[in-house]
Image (spheres, grey):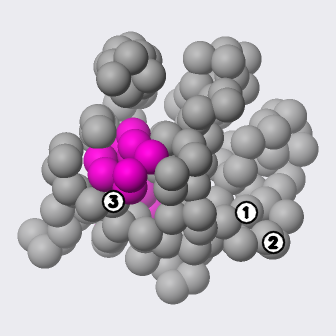
């Protein structure tokens, strides 16, 4: 990660973005404001071992991640067609967003882009209904994330 990149801090405005999902449809973070909290999950590569395990955990426990008041948006620097093949292969029914071009721009905005590898770190950002960052966790590419902090932060948002 270059020195100019910093992850948004808790309480700050989440950087807005519009990216294509696995079907080529635009998905805009700010379109969920006032309606849903959003968990933005950056991951290095489709079809890789740890990434598949993490997104399968989301898929297999979707009620704990996504519902009437929260939306999962999974983001990588993979091309849209790769994401579509992976979503079909793994039966992911939440949006997989392509930060492919301009390459890694959104990952850079979130401070999780690794320039040398052209990939995103494992960054997780819970964005509240007002568009503010409520919780963050950033792991290196080879480190699997622990979603327990996310579940605690989401529970706190829901009870507020």
Q: Residues within 10 Å of mark 3 (few under 14, many from 20)?
A: many
Specify whether 141 is left or right of 54: left
Element assignment for label 3: loop
Element assignment for label 1: loop
Give residue 21's quadrant in the image: bottom right
- What span is colored magenta in the figure? 116-133
**Disc 1 and disc 3 in contact, CB within 8 angstroms:** no
Q: Residues under labels 1 and 2: Cα distance? A: 5 Å
> Is residue 2 something one can see in this rendering?
yes
Residue identified by numbered label 3 = 14
Q: Residues under labels 1 and 3: Cα distance? A: 19 Å
- Nearer-the-camera pick, 59 or 53: 59
Residue identified by numbered label 1 = 21
Residue identified by numbered label 2 = 24
Percent position of residue 31, x then y: 59, 63
Specify whether 155 is left or right of 49: left
Percent position of residue 48, x then y: 61, 41
**Image quarter hosting the C terminus:** top left
Q: Is residue 138 magenta?
A: no
Q: Residues within 10 Å of mark 2 (few under 14, many from 20)?
A: few
Percent position of residue 129, x then y: 45, 46
Residue at 38%, 17% in the rendered image? 159
Give residue 20's quadrant in the image: bottom right
Residue at 50%, 56% in the rendered image? 33
**Disc 1 and disc 2 in contact, CB within 8 angstroms:** yes
């Amino acid at each position: 990660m270059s020195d100019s990149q910093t992850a948004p801090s808790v309480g700050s405005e989440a950087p807005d973005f519009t990216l294509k999902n696995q079907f080529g449809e635009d998905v805009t973070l700010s379109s969920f404001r006032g309606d849903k909290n959003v968990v933005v999950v950056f991951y290095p590569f489709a079809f890789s071992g740890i990434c598949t395990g993490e997104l399968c955990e989301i898929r297999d426990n979707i009620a704990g991640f996504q519902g009437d008041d929260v939306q999962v948006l999974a983001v990588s620097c993979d091309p849209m067609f790769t994401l579509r093949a992976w979503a079909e292969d793994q039966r992911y029914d939440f949006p997989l967003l392509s930060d492919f071009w301009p390459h890694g721009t959104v990952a850079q905005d979130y401070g999780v882009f690794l320039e040398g590898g052209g990939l995103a770190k494992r960054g997780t950002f819970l964005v509240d209904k007002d568009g503010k960052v409520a919780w963050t966790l950033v792991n290196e590419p080879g480190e699997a994330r622990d979603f327990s902090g996310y579940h605690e932060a989401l529970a706190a948002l829901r009870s507020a």
